[in-house]
Amino acid sequence: MMLFKIAFRNILRNGRRSLMTASAIAVGAVAMILFGEYLGFVMVGMETGAVESSGHLTVFRKGYFDFGSGNPAAYSIDRYESVIHLIKNDPELKPELAVVTPTVSLFGIAGNFALDASKTFFGVGFVPSDREKMRRWNEYGIMRDYHYRDLGVSDNDENHGVVGVGLARVLGLCKPLKIADCPSPSKVVQAPVTDAPAPDVNLAELSARDRPAGQPAAKNSAPRIDLLAATAEGAPNVVSFFVNKAENQGFKELDDNYVGMNIRLAQQLLYGRGERKAVSIAIQLHRSEDMAGARARLNRLFAEHHLDLEVHDFTELQPQYNQIIGFLSAIFTFIAVIMGVIVLFTVVNTMSMSVMERTNEIGTARAMGVRRSGIRRQFLIEGWMLGVIGATAGLILGSLIANWFNRLGITYLPPGQAHPVPLVLLTQGGWGLLGSVWFGLMLMAMIAAIVPANRAARMLVVDALRHV
């Protein structure tokens, strides 16, 4: 206890220098805490977005993950309702499940024959009510009420849905959908071609031919386009699709091709009059912590029932998740190293100056019988105490700044998002980060005091006493 009292008095002896040293440590702690909490927010924000859109786990027929995107009909799940029933009623999985829902993915051509415009599209068919439930997943409490926008697809009307803003622009739907900053396509005059291939498919004719005899075309105030795709048997199939709204998808490639529709319409387009299947089954859990256990249980369940199915989690379906997390973690490591080096040199400089100023005291203490280990211990305690004071002040200041920042209600547009989201620093459950920063800076300050402490301990008593 006496060593601690002496160390504290020595720190106060040159208060200005000690204050600057502790301030440097505190600034390092604030920088690491704020960026670490922002990194935590980005991690859970990306996870929340991925889980909202595709769930934690997705069940495919074996081979789809590698080859199915080119031919989804060939890798579809037969009798998917029985698979969903099996998953929902498993006693181990049932308490962990939030939503289990089928989806259909397909490709084709979207056409607005009134304007002679067409574009390839990527369609996603889903159960709208299930998708609404999935969008409410908010385990970490970072999303607010304004995050939930109108889905644009209903269970009751399978012919209505949404498209990407880019696809709406290409098909000339800017004016009917009242899309801001969306120019209408200009008419392009094409030069005549002598060796022309077979004429394009007339979507209007195919659509009318596909309707039962005597049934008139549907009347609707929403703009109408036609979707053409090949069925599982290879025959062309056309359905009418009414666009409720256009929504930016965040990525231009997806925005220029996206069509979101009711799963029944997607099944009609992809499978025709054949058996209605599902391309995948999305599974959303209540907690992300249960994902590994749920995946293992699903694999056992499918093996027990001899089902030709495989399970993938959202990090495999969205590989950019791990890439972005790794990139931000590398930045955090770089900042931590820079802050650690600053603390190291600051404490070394402070403790070296203290050793030089107290040379006579060191000689006197040694002459009175204090061992070298006692002198070394004295300076190590002073370095440790500077680290504790600076790191503690940094933790308090960083927490105050983080809470003040979160009250400002700032929003921003992150990569891959089409709408602003709240920008917050994740202070909930951040004790691991705070403890790591505090312990790391304290340890770095103590390590920095080793060199000056050894120099003081190695001083010869006679030289130290006659030092001027």
Image (cartoon, rainbow, N blue to C red):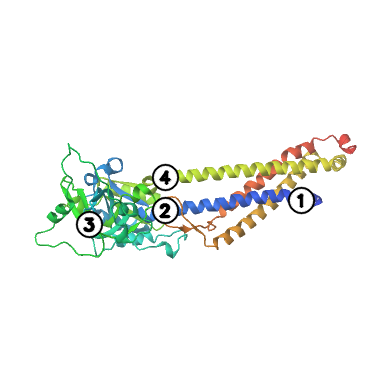
Left or right: where 360 falls relative to 16: right
Which of the two labelled residues, at mark 4 and mark 1, occupies the earlier sequence position? 1
Instruction: Please give the label number shown on residue 320.
Output: 4
Q: Position of residue 350 (x, y in %)?
A: 75, 44
Disc 4 versus disc 3: distance between alpha carbons?
A: 30 Å
Q: Quadrant of the C terminus?
A: top right
Which of the two labelled residues, at mark 2 and mark 1, occupies the earlier sequence position? 1
Three-letter code, disc 3: Leu
Which of the two labelled residues, at mark 1 and mark 3, occupies the earlier sequence position? 1
Which of the two labelled residues, at mark 3 and mark 2, occupies the earlier sequence position? 3
Disc 2 versus disc 4: distance between alpha carbons?
A: 14 Å
Three-letter code, disc 2: Gln
Q: Position of residue 375 (x, y in %)?
A: 79, 41
The residue tagged 1 is 4
Which of the two labelled residues, at mark 2 and mark 4, occupies the earlier sequence position? 4
Three-letter code, disc 4: Gln
Left or right: where 398 falls relative to 207: right
Q: Are there few (<14), some (14-19), or many (20+) residues within 10 Å of tag 4?
A: few
Three-letter code, disc 1: Phe
The foreground one among 114 and 224 is 114
The residue tagged 3 is 265
The residue tagged 2 is 417
Disc 1 versus disc 3: distance between alpha carbons?
A: 76 Å
